Image: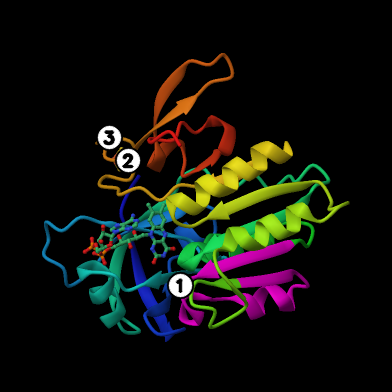
Amino acid sequence: MHDISAIVHAQHVLNAGYQCLVLDAPAIASMAQPGQFVHLRITGLEPAALRRPFSIYRASDSQLSILYKTVGRGTEQLSRLRPGDTLTAMGPLGNGFPLETHDRWPVLVAGGYGVAPLSFLARRLNRQGMLLVGGRTAADILCTEEFTALGWDVRVATMDGSQGTHGLVTTLLDAWLARPGHPAATFYACGPDGMLRAVAERAQLAGSPAWLSLDKHMVCGVGACLACVQRLRKPDGTTWIARVCRDGPIFEAGEIVWEHPR
Ligand SMILES: Cc1cc2nc3c(=O)[nH]c(=O)nc-3n(C[C@H](O)[C@H](O)[C@H](O)COP(=O)(O)OP(=O)(O)OC[C@H]3O[C@@H](n4cnc5c(N)ncnc54)[C@H](O)[C@@H]3O)c2cc1C
Ligand code: FES
């Protein structure tokens, strides 16, 4: 996988701490699938700095966007880039979400910036469904108008009650699952590990498939360094070590061996 030069087309502030970066990068954008990511070498960081991985939020034939939260040195420098600046990108990397819902209702569960690949997914699925989105405060709730405009049922939860239901996003999921006669669902989720695990447990109890996007620290991004390993279970019960960057980041919930038993 080669480095591709990408030019900053635009940079928009979304909510406090969150921005959207639009890149002219046709070689990556034209091939991108929902759930895949780009590994960016951020101009302005020292040459030895690691690349940073970001899910693809939007892609057309010529441009791709990422939606990111400023959390440290790399994302802070990213937020300083302006139209015309260049950076280098590898991608699209990873496997992406399966787009076949097998006549099940797509239920997307997002935490914070986890909504980015799910927004891309919603645009590429051939049917509407439901988005459950959670965050610490209203500032962590992004993209809901896009889903509403696409005709999706959108439900919001915040930990401080500043938007939607007061509590975790899984409160919304539990309420929906408790409703008699809810349709058979396929779950797609992206967010913090605790949320992914909670979705996995509920999907397994409901006998529903759940596709989870794992967020691991990455170094090479292409399967060479073992920085991003995750133990998975095969159907015969044996386990193997996957590289999230190359074999994922999307895995079916039943495959994942969670590190700390509950
Ligand atoms: C497949 C994949 C897709 C991702 N997609 C997005 C996205 O769409 N939008 C987005 O904002 N971020 C995304 N991330 C996380 C993003 O890569 C990190 O936030 C970023 O690398 C942090 O760089 P930094 O230099 O700003 O922070 P650092 O200075 O490296 O770290 C600052 C803080 O962020 C934490 N951090 C660093 N990397 C990660 C990570 N991978 N996951 C969780 N916490 C991390 C560190 O532990 C530390 O607490 C994704 C990560 C992966 C693996
Ligand atoms: S980041 Fe190097 S193997 Fe995944």
Relative image position of residue 116 (x, y in whole percent): 52, 65
Residue 133 is inside the magenta segment = yes
> In the rendered image, which quarter is residue 7 located in?
bottom left
Q: Between label 2 and label 1, give the one nearer the viewer.
A: 1
Relative image position of residue 50 (x, y in whole percent): 20, 55
Amino acid type of the residue that numbered disc 2 sits on in the rendered structure: Cys
Q: Which residue is mark 1?
A: 136
On the question of residue 225 being in view, the answer is: yes
In the rendered view, tell whether residue 231 sits above or below residue 146. Answer: above
Query: Decide: marks 3, 2 in contact (CB < 8 A)?
Result: yes
Horizontally, is 91 left or right of 60 in the view?
left
Relative image position of residue 35 (x, y in whole percent): 53, 53
Compute the Cα span from label 3 to label 1: 32 Å
- Does any atom of ligand 1 lie closer than 8 Å to the CB of label 1? no
Residue 13 is inside the magenta segment = no
Relative image position of residue 52 (x, y in whole percent): 29, 58
Query: Decide: marks 2, 1 in contact (CB < 8 A)?
Result: no
Query: Decide: marks 3, 1 in contact (CB < 8 A)?
Result: no
Horizontally, is 220 left or right of 248 in the view?
left
Read off the magenta span. Answer: 130-156
| Viewer-nearest residue: 13 or 183 | 183
- Does any atom of ligand 2 lie closer than 8 Å to the CB of label 3? yes
**Mark sitting earlier along the chain (2/1):** 1
Amino acid type of the residue that numbered disc 1 sits on in the rendered structure: Arg
In the structure shown, which secondary structural element does the residue marked by tag 1 occupy? loop
Q: Which residue is mark 3?
A: 226
Checking the image for residue 255, the label placed there is none
Q: Residues within 10 Å of mark 1 (few under 14, many from 20)?
A: many
Q: Residue at x 76, y 61 (%)?
A: 129
Horizontally, is 9 left or right of 123 in the view?
left
